[in-house]
Image (tube, grey):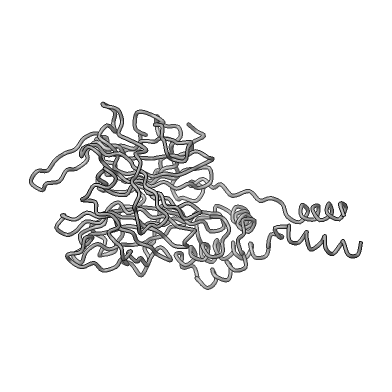
Amino acid sequence: MRRVLWLALAGCQAEYAIVAPVDVHPDEVTECAFEAVDGAPEVERYTCNPVFVATDEPWAEELTAVTFGHTNVLDHPFYQLWYFARTDDGPTAGYATSPDGTSFAPHPDNPQWPRTARDAWDGGLVQNAQVTYDRSRETYLMLYGGISRDLQVFGLGVATSPDGQRWATAPTNPVLDLRLLFGGVQIAWPMALEVADDGEVDAYMAATADGDHLSMYRFATDDPAAWLQPGEEVFGPGKAGRFDDQGLLDAAVVELDGVSYLFYVGFGRWEDDPTKGVRYERDAFLGVATSTDGGHTWTRDRTDPLPVQVDPAGSISAVTAQVVGSHILLWVSDVYPEVGPGVGYFVYTPEAR
Amino acid sequence: MRVIVPLGACWALAACPGPPPAATCSDLCDALMYDCGYAAFPDRASCEQGCRYDVSEGGDAAGLYACILEAGCDTPLVLECSRAYGGAP
């Protein structure tokens, strides 16, 4: 029997060898090259940035949120882009795909977003949408910040899609009323979203305990349409005088080789507009932190920003990250000269630090 | 021994992850790289390695190929084919 078993195993080895995953650097498939970024050997910048400004779709003139994802085909990434626009009929959404991460083709059936009533809690605009694929439920999952037309109602919404293009909002929306304290903090908007293979959903959200500084809180649930447990603060503003001492605007969390990476937009000051009763973040740059305990505690990798900003005054507003092979791909929303708001493409290689 | 050998062979068939479907991987790469012209694949070797890896992770290359033929180079549909039949996350 031992001989037969050995023969069987030998048969396996002869017939089938272990196949390694592919590890394609983005510059192998893009039209333009990547170049080193001074002061950060772990970062490369795409030389034809920005890779996304807007589409030619007539409804997409005023974009309010942009986020990226990817789906592997034969272990090679194809990129996905979701974008929201404010229109006279309310918020609406587009979906675009790209084989190389730089040129995106809008879906022919755009726009697609459930029609909202004029007085709906999310009838004004959608901001800070976060999308991930939920393997346990075989659906795309989205968390978004919704705002009413009169800017008086702020809520957290959930939407799902079978294919990334056709979305349905949850009947329990808003799953959280963001005008109210939840777990002792005021949540501002979702920053990042993860779904584990067992279906647990982790949302990282910007929230404030003092009404002035924004931290990153982690909230967990087994049901994305029901958020009942208070969150824990997992990452706070930088120390006084640092670039991020006022707090965090946006974040992206990815894991590579057992280390979690947090790319975050940190900002240094508020600018108030008393006539409109709103405040705007200023001096916003990109930072990076790491965690080895699954994202419960984070350590800043550097006290200064990653030097990827286009506008030296600091106009970065959002970041999305995706792990592809041994690289982390970053899409960073910034303000480009003679272009305006646009999204730049970067590669972050941890082992080059 | 005549009894043991067939049992062993069955066990072996169950344990082996299966041979790489070379013809199907070749067909898949033809479809994606040349028929659809997708830039995602830097070269043929990378495409076929990715295909073999996908199969080793539980992917159904034949099912994927049939789905991609049906999708007809419609990229969003191709992505959904990979969600349905691909093995690597």
Q: Position of residue B30 (x, y in %)?
A: 59, 64
What residue is shown at x 45% (from left), y 54% (from top)?
A: A70
Locate residue A274, reporting x and y percent.
Answer: 9, 43
- Percent of width and height locating residue A41: 45, 32
**Horizontal arrangement in the rendering, residue B84 relative to residue A330 (left or right):** right
- Residue that lies at the very extreme toward the left in this rendered image: A275
Q: How many marks are shown on the rendered structure?
A: 0
Q: Quadrant of the N terminus of chain B?
A: bottom right
- Does residue A152 sit above or below A295 in this rendering? below
Q: Is residue A121 above or below residue A301?
A: below
In this rendering, would A122 be left or right of A232?
A: left
A37 or A174: nearer the viewer? A174
- Residue pictured at 34% horizontal, 55% vertical: A143
Look at the picture and state if B35 lies above or below A155: below
Residue under the point 45% across and 50% down: A31
Residue A307, x across and y down, in percent: 35, 34
Q: Is residue A5 left or right of residue A217?
A: right
Q: On the rendered structure, is A233 left or right of A281?
A: right
Considering every residue shown, the one lying at the far bottom of the view is B70
Nearer-the-camera pick, A166 or B8: B8
Q: Point out the residue furthest to the right here.
A: B1
Along the line of sight, the residue nearer the viewer: A269 or A153: A153
Q: Quadrant of residue A337?
A: top left
